[in-house]
Amino acid sequence: MAKSSKIPDPTIERLAQYSRPLEVLLKNGALLILSEKLAELCGVSPAQVRKDLAYFGEFGIRGVGYDIRALLQEIKHILATDREWTLCIVGMGNLGRALVENENFQRRGYNFVAVFDSDPKKIGKTLPCGLTIEPANKIRELIRKLGITIGVISTPPFEAQRVANLLIDSGIKAILNFAPTRIRTPDNCAVENVDFTVKLENLAYHLGKIS
Amino acid sequence: MAKSSKIPDPTIERLAQYSRPLEVLLKNGALLILSEKLAELCGVSPAQVRKDLAYFGEFGIRGVGYDIRALLQEIKHILATDREWTLCIVGMGNLGRALVENENFQRRGYNFVAVFDSDPKKIGKTLPCGLTIEPANKIRELIRKLGITIGVISTPPFEAQRVANLLIDSGIKAILNFAPTRIRTPDNCAVENVDFTVKLENLAYHLGKIS
DNA sequence: CCTATTATGTGCATAAATTCACAATAAGCT
DNA sequence: AGCTTATTGTGAATTTATGCACATAATAGG
């Protein structure tokens, strides 16, 4: 089934993007989609769509297209998003709170089960989502007790590495980092960075060229 | 000075990343940095650092390294972040509010000067940052009056394209999109997407492979 | 059952990005 | 000044990713 060998990183990123319009189409009752249509919805080439999918198997029907429900299921299976994940988040500033309440996470099976901060004024407070802010020194204990597998960092940059170390030490194998700084992890712990100021500077560069 | 011809997109992204540790080093009083050190701080190869910079000129001193202050200034000039930008944001949910209050924006010269929402219950409310939520039908007027150049979208996905059209119509030339959906823009309007659920699915993929 | 039509899957060509390896050059030391 | 050492800047080689173009397979119609 899976040819795996070596999957390009951009392919994984795109698979996630493919799933977005597919979910909408499925909800709207559509049954079939062509690589051309999906490509257009995602802003890539049709050949790219087919090649990305072909890394993992033959999901389409030649001369016909792709069965939306089946394709979505396959993608979710590949991405391992066909199950529930438990997350914790460290750093309960404005961004942290917004993330915890953000419904896009739960909708896709990402459930926050613990939130941490080191500020004594915040500790003990209960959020609208029902979680109570725990002190940082409980990170290890709660990660183990609750079987948390993914950690989210939304602290100020200068604290990010320390928090990351704490998470890694507690057995976390994947970190989503919102602090605008690089964090170092061992090979057995994956990191993804979300730095929107970098994106803004990208925009500024393009604007600067024309104006 | 600038050889420009064609700059790889990843190079621009990395330039922004280089500036992060440089700012910290500068504040700490460091004067010089080697490509090797900067590379290490950013998780790339030294040759990559040098090549990225070389697209725009010769900023280093052979046998010595780079003057941190000068290099940072050059990078900021390249990225056009050596000036102030005025932004607006549409969609004042949890995320939108967190973004407006986020200090990382102002610190880098990105100033929100207008915030919009279509929910009558939110319109007219004043945020901690001092801005008052305006109705969506004032977007065009305020963008022109305040000379806003960058628009941020933090609405639910199904409204994102409509909002984008409104922004484009009002003369916006760059959009930072937080809605987990692709938005279409004409060639003269740049878009950057920040979709953290995509990043999470990336993590899930890597986790799924091992567990 | 055969042919025409359609859209996938894929080997190969192209393009883009990264790394290598070394020439160029600046500074320090004798 | 000349020699040594250090690190940048860069052309060429390599690797990675994308796009093309067609063989393959499924369906529909006569």
Image: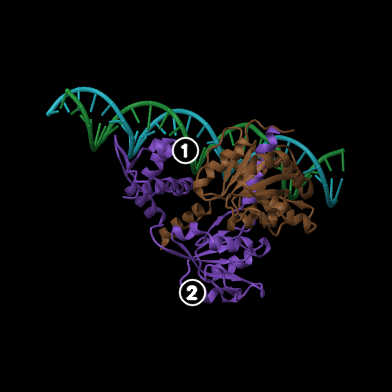
Chain colours: A brown, B purple, C green, D cyan
Judge the density around disc 2: few (<14), some (14-19), many (≥20) Cα neighbours within 10 Å. Answer: few
Question: Which chain does the residue under circle 2 lie in?
Answer: B
Q: Residue A74, percent across and down?
A: 75, 42
Dot 2: element: helix
Q: Residue at x 66, y 45 (%)?
A: B201
Would you place residue A75 above or below residue A128 in this image?
above
Amino acid beneath label 2: Arg
Along the line of sight, which residue is nearer the eye, A116 or D21?
A116
Please state the horizontal and vertical placement of residue B26, each as a whole percent of the image.
36, 47
User: Which residue has dot 2 on it?
Assistant: B144
* Of labels 2 and 1, the one closer to you: 1
Q: Is residue A47 visible?
A: no
For the residues labelled 2 and 1, the Cα–Cα distance comes to 41 Å
Nearest the viewer among B148 and C22 is B148
Report the front residue among A91 and B169. Answer: A91
The disc at residue B44 is: 1
Name the residue: 47% across, 76% down: B145
Q: Is residue B128 above or below residue B72?
A: below
Pick the front one: A194 or A160? A160
